[in-house]
Image (cartoon, rainbow, N blue to C red):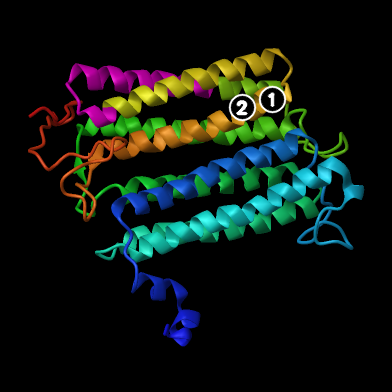
Amino acid sequence: MPNLLELVRNPIAYIAARWTPTPRTLRRATLAALVMSVVIIVTGGAVRLSSSGLGCDTWPKCSSDSLYATSEMGVHGAIEFGNRMLTYVLSAAVGWAIVAARSAEPRRRGLSRLAWSQFWLVMGNAVIGGVTVLTGLNPYSVAGHFLLALGLLTVSTLTWVRSGEGDTEPRPLVGKSVKQVVQVLTVCCAALVAVGTVVTGAGPHAGDSSKVPRMPVDWKTVAQVHADLAWIVVALTLAVWLVLRAFDAPVGPLRRTRELMLVLLAQGVIGYVQYFTELPEVLVGAHLLGAAIVWIAVLRLLLSVRERGLPPGQAASVPDDLDVRLPAPAVSVTDQPAVASSKP
């Protein structure tokens, strides 16, 4: 018979004492949370682009006299309420990641903390989403809502990547100069996304009616700044790729850099097309999805310039999407973009 008192008092510890996930199961659990982090960003954008931001005109209820959307609220109410319900799916995915990380053997406390961080980010963003509705889609709270969703995407990506790595001290795979350029690239990409929220806050898609306030800046000027930052990110990515190629880099950083370049080019095409076609909703939504994918690609590149060995319980094989290498002597030249070779 199960110990019901123990189950009620600490259900996660109860499960962890009786179940150990395989490395593949852990990987899938953290990936599910990452996928749902992307989905909630895209569906949140769909709410705004369909002018359904006030489809439910209050929070936490959908209306003053109903917890859920009714037929009288029409399609806008259904879209807004549907996005709210997806938060529960996201919470379930994050919960699975928390349980899997806590149940892993040997115990991986750092991974568990990352998984739990996702839960608190989801809860915090739910509150900010409510504030956004209660303030009539104030553009600054809308921007904050997106940036916190991006924070969740960041942590879920870190959790996913770390679930496929070991817990040894990080060992650099590239020289100090290359690592610094990748760090600058990451900062520039973060600035790119942040400026993108200003473009959204000042642009024509307010989220509901034309009466919704906008940020008091010229959105076309901000869009030009956004485009300039995008070109800086592309240039830095190209520079990293050329240096890695020139110095015979390990396959992991090279692959991550190539992937980032491809998604940046696709995102750039979508961005320019939407700008010159007066921001059609479908392309704006595609650009939002692209922003999430670009950020994931940047984080994967940042994490690929070091390695932490194989994950516990996985000594013989490595998943195709990982580029973990067994420890090997590192090659470095002071202040030169040297890298450690992965060749046998």
Q: In the figure, residue 244 lies in which quadrant?
A: top left
Q: Which residue is disc 1 drawn over? A: 282
Does residue 158 sit above or below 266 in this rendering? below
For the point 54% across and 41% down, which residue is it?
A: 38
Residue 138 horizontal side relative to residue 245, left or right: right
Task: Say if residue 273 shows up in the picture.
Answer: yes
> How far apart, in angstroms, are the residues tagged by discs 1 and 2?
6 Å
The relative height of residue 15 versus residue 33 in the rendered view (above or below) is below
Amino acid type of the residue that numbered disc 1 sits on in the rendered structure: Val
Above or below — where is 3 with respect to 229? below
Q: Nearer the viewer, residue 342 or 195?
A: 342
Res. 1 image quadrant: bottom left
Residue depicted at 47% across the width and 48% down the height = 32
Q: Nearer the viewer, residue 14 or 55?
A: 14
Residues 235 and 1: in front is 1
Write the start and end of the magenta stretch as one range. Answer: 228-253
- Secondary structure beneath dot 1 equals helix
Q: Element at badge 2?
A: helix
Label 1 packing within 10 angstroms: few (<14), some (14-19), many (20+): few
Q: Are marks 1 and 2 in contact (CB under 8 Å)?
A: yes
* Residue 314 position within the rendered picture, expressed as x and y whole percent measured from the top left: 21, 50
Can you say which quadrant of the picture contains the C terminus?
top left
Q: Nearer the viewer, residue 312 or 247?
A: 312
Question: Does the magenta portion include 314?
Answer: no
Report the magenta stretch's main SS: helix
User: What label sits on residue 286 in the rendered view?
Assistant: 2
Side of 125 relative to 313 (left or right): right
Total labels drawn: 2
Q: With respect to residue 200, does 91 lie above or below?
A: below
Residue 260 in percent (x, y) is at 40, 26
Q: Position of residue 182 (x, y in %)?
A: 34, 31
The amino acid type, in three-letter code, at marker 2 is Ala
